[in-house]
Amino acid sequence: MESLFLVIATLCYLSGTIGYLVYLLRDREVLHRISWSILLAGALFHGAALVMLTIETGHFPVTSIQEAISLFAWVFVVTYLVIQIKLQLRILGSFVSPLAVIFMISSQLLPTKAILRNGSSGSGWLIAHVASIFLANALFAVLFSLGIMYLLQERRIKKKNFGLLYERLPSLERIDSIAHVCLLSGFPLMTAGLITGFAYAAMVWRSPWNWDPKEVLSVVTWMIYAILVHERLTVGWRGRRAAWLAIIGFLATVLTFVLASLLLSGHHSVISGNLYG
Amino acid sequence: MSHIILLGMNHKTAPVEIREQLAVACRKEVNPLGMLPNLEHVEELVFLSTCNRVEFLFTCGAISEGISEVKALLRTHVGLPTSLPLDSYLYVHKDLEAVKHLFMVASSLDSMVVGEPQILGQLKEAYRFAVEFRTVKTVLNRLMHKAFSVAKRVRTETCIGSCAVSVSYAAVELARKIFGQVKDKRVLLIGAGEMAELAADHFLRQGVRSMVVANRTLERSIELAARFNAETVPFDSLLEELKTTDIVVSSTGAREPIIGYRDVKARMRERRNRPLFFIDIAVPRDIDPKVNEIDNVYVYDIDDLQGVIEFNKEERLSQARTAEHIIDEETIKFRNWMESLSAVPTIVSVREKAERIRQNEVRKTFSQLPDLNDREREAIEVLTSSILKKLLHDPIMFLKRKAQRDSLAVYMDFTQQLFNLIEGMDEVDAPQAENEKADDQVFLKAAKK
């Protein structure tokens, strides 16, 4: 049942994305409304599937990288749906929804091996860790999309070379201010996620820091965002450089999330999961 | 025969300091037109002064004397020291060149921003003053009216006019793409010019509340500030204003850029990197193009803005060519009219007209009296001819005597009107359409000759 729901959700995300891409080319409000509704339907199916999975297995669906990315995709779509309601930046959907599809499809393609032997063992710390990290990363994914939008628009204005996108994209200041909100809400969540992660590690492995590659990469990613936040608040860093750093930060996040889990050894990774198992 | 001379300077020939000094002096209560009675060689005079140009249009019999008198008038009126080498800034156009130049100015082809709409109004104002001071007579009266109709023709037959309006519109649209809302932004207006004022007007209408004016001359600053409900800042401290303004509209006409890369770069940190948008309407440019390379700074010069609107460069060039063609055509028409003002052609046409009437009437008489023999016919021919000859003798002698005078044009023009040599030619203040009709006839007539 839940795999059927996941397929439906994927199809919803896909058609929502197509709708939003058409919306990018054609300014019809109805396109946006339909696409947004389809994404919402997808998120509902996806959510239902995740709940069923949790009930069935008795633990949060974060025990394999496949489950983790799937859960992340869901958090990401829900985050976008909420941001859209709050900020009404319709064109953002055209840049965010393709990411949702990529996450969703890659979650189906990646191996289903377990990362953690038993997801429920960490109790509250693990839930807090996963929730805050996922929400932070969802916000950073939106920040990444905004960064791309900013760079596209900035380039058009700077090079004085206008096209269709120039018409459709919002003003630089608007993109930048939304990015500001995403960054300033995502960063504390990420910090909290790291702290709870260390607390969980201290409980399970009796040491908060184990030189696990994922831990190291997480801290590096955190530092990228820390620089961004710091520069923004002190000297008002914005625009192109901030957009690039947001993009680099998110790529580092993806690296942390996917590569470290797949390839490197450590207790967050598949191999170590096997070792523990 | 008198010559038409146009003497002046514009944004292309004179540095802004000199032009501003002139423009300020010329805004004084004393209009230089009032000095005409003191000028021995100058017959008619029109004085035009805008932000970017100061021009004297006059007619005179002796060219070099006339020019030196007007130059002296310029010097004394403005109070320039004799040591200042004025000549290098001035251009002097004679006769057809002057006519063409005036037509170019009126059609806004000689403006800093080609097609800007204000110049025609300024020229009409200049003409109104000249009429008030009674310094325009036959030639300039006609020339000025002609200039207005040429400008109108250029405006309707090419899209040069719509170009300039959309430039300032494009500037506001771009500001919207950078800032989203422009309402809470601060606009700095550097220098003044028709185009800059147009852009400032546009921003005001978009709800901009905070505007600052920086101008080299305080009077102009105050004038603009009052118009746009703005503050004024000294010209020298305008770089400091970059810390607080968001949009800069610049059109000073300075020779060198007034804002360089370092000026802006150094102030971006203090601005906390808030975006800064320069609209550089001046030619040559006021803002160093390198400034555009700074992050969060956007520089658009007039070409960029024109590029924003659909008009591509080639289209604009071809429009300009069309406009110049119109002007050349009108210049030739005016030349033909000018030539008709000298004594000989006028006398010839008076005689021709009289002869034409005589022949027509004689033919009618002959057709009613078929019985006349050749001798009788000849007698009638001789009779009518000698009546005409005697009747025209005095007027023609009068015109020949006047041919040596400076006031020739007045008499010639008067004679042409008296004898209705150019059909449909009305008084100069007649509606434009009729004027144009008259012009066409002059042209046709000249072509026949």
Image (spheres, rainbow, N blue to C red):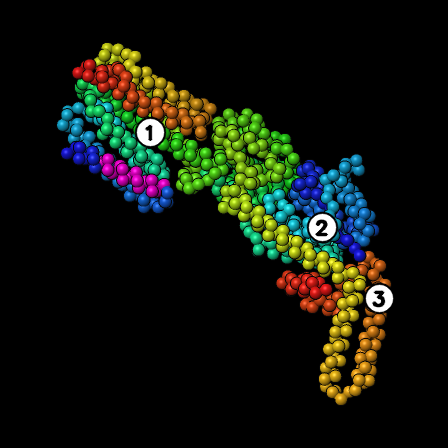
Mark 1 packing: few (<14 Cα in 10 Å), some, or many (20+)? many
Q: Nearer the viewer, mark 2 or mark 1?
A: 2
Q: Name the side, left or right, on which B445 lies relative to B67.
A: left
Query: Bounds of the magenta span?
Result: A9-24
Residue drawn at 56 percent across, 33 percent down: B289
Q: Residue furthest bottom?
A: B371
**Residue annotated with mark 3:** B398
Residue behind mark 1:
A141
Front-lying residue, A168 or A133: A168
Q: Residue sitting at 76 percent across and 37 percent down?
A: B85
CA gap, disc 2 and disc 1:
67 Å
Quadrant occupied by the C terminus of chain A: top left
Q: Amino acid at mark 2?
A: Ala
Mark drawn on residue B98: 2
Magenta-highlighted stretch: main secondary structure?
helix
Q: Is residue B194 left or right of residue A264?
A: right
Image quarter of residue A62: top left
- Residue at the image point whose x is 20% and y is 22% from the top: A113
From the image, which quarter does the N terminus of chain A lie in?
top left
State whether residue B46 appears in this view. Answer: no
Disc marking residue B321: none
